[in-house]
Image (cartoon, rainbow, N blue to C red):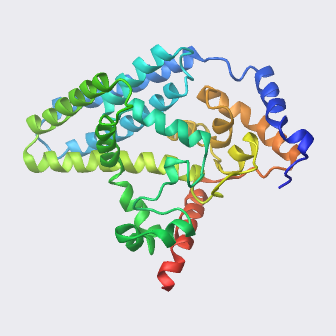
Amino acid sequence: MSAGTAETKGSDFSRLARRITDAGLLERRPVYYAVRVGAWALAYAGGWAAFALIGDSWWQLLVAAGLAVVFAQFGFIAHDLGHRQVFRRRRPSTAAGRIIGNLCIGLGWDWWTDKHTRHHANPNHEEHDPDVSPAVIVWSAGQAAESRGLPRLVARHQAFWFFPLLTLEAWHLHVASFRALLRPDARGRWVEAALLAAHSACYLGAVFAVLSPGKAVAFLALHQGLFGVYLGCTFAPNHKGMPTLTGRTSLDYLRKQVLTARNVRGGVLLDVALGGLNYQIEHHLFPNMPTPNLRRAQPIVRAYCAELGVEYAETGLLDSYRQALRHLHAVGAPLRAG
């Protein structure tokens, strides 16, 4: 990687931004989002209609799997709303985000958007990025050395635990959404609380009203487990196993965003499956760029990084998981040796 000269380093991103702007890639895509939201809204309604029609049957596990996909896709749309890719103004973005996030899938939109904004400001920075804060999983040798209790025990073989732990991710997000309402600085606390409570009452009420207790528990376990795995498998390839930062960094905006992110190669089906987040480098450079424009921005960004000598990471989906798991396994090596 070339760090660039002091004279050019600060203006590298501005030159790239001009190319992207000149290509019209920051312009809104209202028709795309109308079709996308409409299609997944129909799938959401169809899933719950099927649930009501099938009744107390083990075939409901198929419905649970299908709704897990729909919930994740709603999560991707809420993500885009948080970055104001859909609407220019804050008010409609917030209203739509709360309906889709809080009411439809039970995740606190304001809380998650705030957390995700901090991630974008300092990606993979151990002291500032909440996505690499040590919890059950640790992300660096330093975090592993300082870990205690359950995280230290898990960290020894965390690469093997990673995907099983993702089955709990949706439950973790639900709990975190409610806990965030207790913060003194929580935005829209009562609106968020009302919508989360309405989702929980309708969701749990419908499941236990239609299904016998055993089937209801199985439905919840499969639906929420697959929902968490889907979300985790979407976000894991993007930064895990990429360089982490600590302390003050001399990296400018462009290098900080590019060097800590990884793109995942694939066609249109992968774009849909991952909500466009497979273009993680372009998304981090231009968070408000509408999802369908990321594919068109990629060759511009990749060529520009080549001009600067900035490493541009891109790989296949399976290899992205291998890289992430190798990193997690390496982080736990000192604990296994000890």
- In the rendered structure, the answer to whether residue 36 lies left or right of residue 207 reads right
Coordinates of residue 58 in the picture (x, y in percent): 16, 47
Q: Residue at x 85, y 46 (%)?
A: 306
Seen in the picture, residue 98 relative to 242 is either above or below; the reply is above
Image quadrant holding the N terminus, namely: bottom right
Q: Residue at x 57, y 73 (%)?
A: 330
Coordinates of residue 97 in the picture (x, y in percent): 42, 24
Q: Residue at x 66, y 58 (%)?
A: 243
Residue 121, image quadrant = top right
Seen in the picture, residue 234 relative to 44 is either above or below; the reply is below
Residue placed most toward the observer, 284 or 121:
121
> In this orientation, does residue 127 appear?
yes
Q: Residue at x 52, y 54 (%)?
A: 132
- In the rendered structure, the answer to whether residue 71 lies left or right of residue 252 reads left
- In the rendered structure, the answer to whether residue 67 lies left or right of residue 31 reads left
Coordinates of residue 179 in the picture (x, y in percent): 30, 41
Seen in the picture, residue 328 relative to 225 is either above or below; the reply is below
